[in-house]
């Protein structure tokens, strides 16, 4: 799901090769740093950021920019420049000239080389082909899955609170067809988020959430969320799992295991949940907590670990062999590989595909894992800064190809889900490229 929800819990933290991270403690430190910034007490802010850094073996892009800013404000320009250099090494870009705190760095020796590198990173790149456009501009297709029984893709819609079958175009045509699945009224009450097709049980697993601040549903529902098992043929709800949370929640992303187990994340509350076994008697159990903004989960090759895209942290790793609620670790990675801002996350062999809509530029990336799938060794950019990609969210693998939902329109709406003034929706796109 989109990062406008993640910013509600965004913290100044890092995706690290480290054991469990104390969310409460880091959030407290971040709040202290923000307080010092308001007081323009740059020395205290720097000390607070350094304390956070001592708890985190590697910094995120956001952390790097904050450290560069505070060093520049303290007059430590060479050190600030080193932070910007580390940021640029991640393949990212940033308009330093538009940042009043960092603008003075342009006068420093060596800045021109860094600026040139970031300009190169801002160039459009696309190693995928466009399958089709979708004929409903305000669809806002959040997730995409493939239903083997019907041979069709299925996409969820934020704006229309429903599901659509996506029919691939005939040869020579450029537009996919859309057929709404007749969901019952209770399933269409809130925006429809994630969807996964369970061929063995003829079910569509659907997450739906009354996202805080959004309009289009009763105010009394604000912050509620549910996971639904829906009959793919009739649209009837077979089983409903309402999330009982202590605060507002958003069940935004999920994955389906080969044994039928469903893993779903609460991007607002920080929890990861599982449903397994007989649908009629199964429970929605929490298996992990304390993440910052968990997005798409995906199983490791051994089936014993769950990778979770934690938007402001990196890629969390949950051990499924221990007791639910155990420690959460983070996937190791080189410092020059950015692993934050990930929305969609998928595994193909020993690689992870990431839909990264929380970086500059927004990207689709492939992370190569080592044989044990314990760390990232390298990355490949599939697409970035492309009007064709726009704001991408999720993907599904079908017959050796990844199909990605792109240009979905999250960047066109405000925090209430309403179209921003002066903006307009353009047709979403479906892209594809090889899994390997």
Image: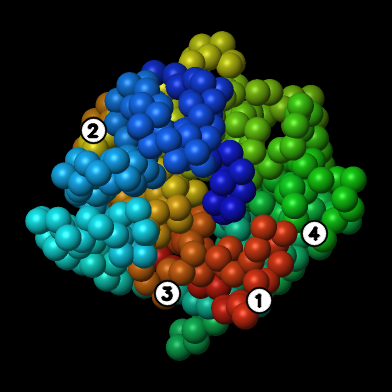
- C-alpha distance separating marks 3 and 1: 22 Å
In the rendered image, which residue does mark 1 sit on? 421
Q: Nearer the viewer, mark 2 or mark 4?
A: 4
The answer to whether any part of residue 48 appears in the image is yes
The residue positioned 86% from the left and 45% from the top of the image is 221
Q: Are marks 4 and 1 in contact (CB under 8 Å)?
A: no
139 relative to 323 in the view: left or right: right
Image mark for residue 388: 3
Q: Residues within 10 Å of mark 1 (few under 14, many from 20)?
A: few
Q: Are marks 1 and 2 in contact (CB under 8 Å)?
A: no
Q: In the rendering, at what x and y percent does residue 96 appear?
A: 30, 60
Q: Toward the viewer: 177 or 188?
A: 188
- C-alpha distance separating marks 2 and 3: 31 Å
Q: Nearer the viewer, mark 2 or mark 3?
A: 3
- C-alpha distance separating marks 1 and 2: 47 Å
- C-alpha distance separating marks 3 and 4: 28 Å
Residue 168, picture quadrant: bottom right
């Amino acid at each position: 799901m989109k990062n406008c929800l993640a910013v509600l819990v965004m913290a100044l933290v890092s995706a690290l090769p480290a054991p469990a991270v104390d969310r409460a403690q880091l959030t407290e430190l971040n709040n202290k740093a923000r307080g010092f910034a308001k007081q323009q007490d740059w020395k205290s802010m720097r000390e607070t950021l350094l304390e956070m850094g001592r708890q985190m073996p590697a910094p995120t892009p956001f952390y790097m920019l904050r450290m560069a800013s505070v060093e520049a404000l303290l007059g430590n320009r060479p050190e600030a420049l080193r932070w910007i250099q580390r940021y640029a090494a991640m393949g990212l870009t940033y308009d330093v000239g538009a940042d009043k705190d960092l603008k003075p760095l342009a006068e420093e020796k060596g800045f021109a080389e860094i600026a040139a590198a970031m300009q190169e990173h801002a160039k459009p790149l696309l190693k995928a082909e466009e399958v089709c456009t979708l004929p409903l501009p305000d669809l806002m297709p959040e997730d995409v899955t493939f239903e083997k029984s019907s041979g069709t893709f299925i996409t969820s819609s934020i704006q229309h609170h429903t599901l659509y079958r996506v029919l691939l175009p005939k040869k020579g045509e450029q537009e996919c067809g859309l057929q709404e699945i007749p969901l019952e009224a209770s399933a269409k009450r809130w925006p429809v988020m994630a969807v996964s097709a369970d061929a063995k049980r003829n079910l569509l697993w659907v997450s739906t959430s009354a996202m805080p601040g959004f309009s289009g549903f009763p105010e009394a529902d604000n912050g509620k969320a549910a996971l639904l098992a829906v009959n793919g043929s009739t649209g009837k709800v077979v089983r409903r799992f309402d999330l009982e949370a202590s605060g507002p929640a958003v069940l935004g992303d999920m994955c389906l295991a080969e044994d039928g187990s469903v893993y779903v994340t609460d991007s607002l509350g920080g929890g990861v949940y599982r449903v397994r076994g007989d649908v009629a008697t199964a429970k929605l159990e929490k298996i992990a907590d304390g993440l910052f903004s968990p997005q798409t989960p995906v199983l490791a090759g051994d089936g014993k670990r769950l990778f979770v895209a934690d938007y402001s942290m990196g890629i969390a790793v949950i051990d499924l062999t221990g007791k639910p609620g155990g420690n959460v670790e983070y996937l190791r990675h080189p410092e020059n590989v950015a692993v934050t801002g990930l929305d969609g996350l998928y595994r193909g062999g020993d690689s992870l595909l990431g839909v990264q809509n929380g970086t500059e530029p927004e990207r689709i990336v492939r992370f190569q894992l080592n044989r044990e799938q314990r760390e990232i060794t390298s990355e490949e950019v599939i697409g970035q800064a492309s009007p064709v990609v726009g704001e991408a969210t999720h993907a599904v693998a079908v017959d050796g190809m990844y199909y990605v939902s792109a240009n979905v329109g999250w960047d066109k709406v405000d925090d209430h889900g309403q179209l921003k003034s002066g903006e307009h929706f353009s047709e979403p796109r479906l892209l594809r490229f090889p899994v390997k």
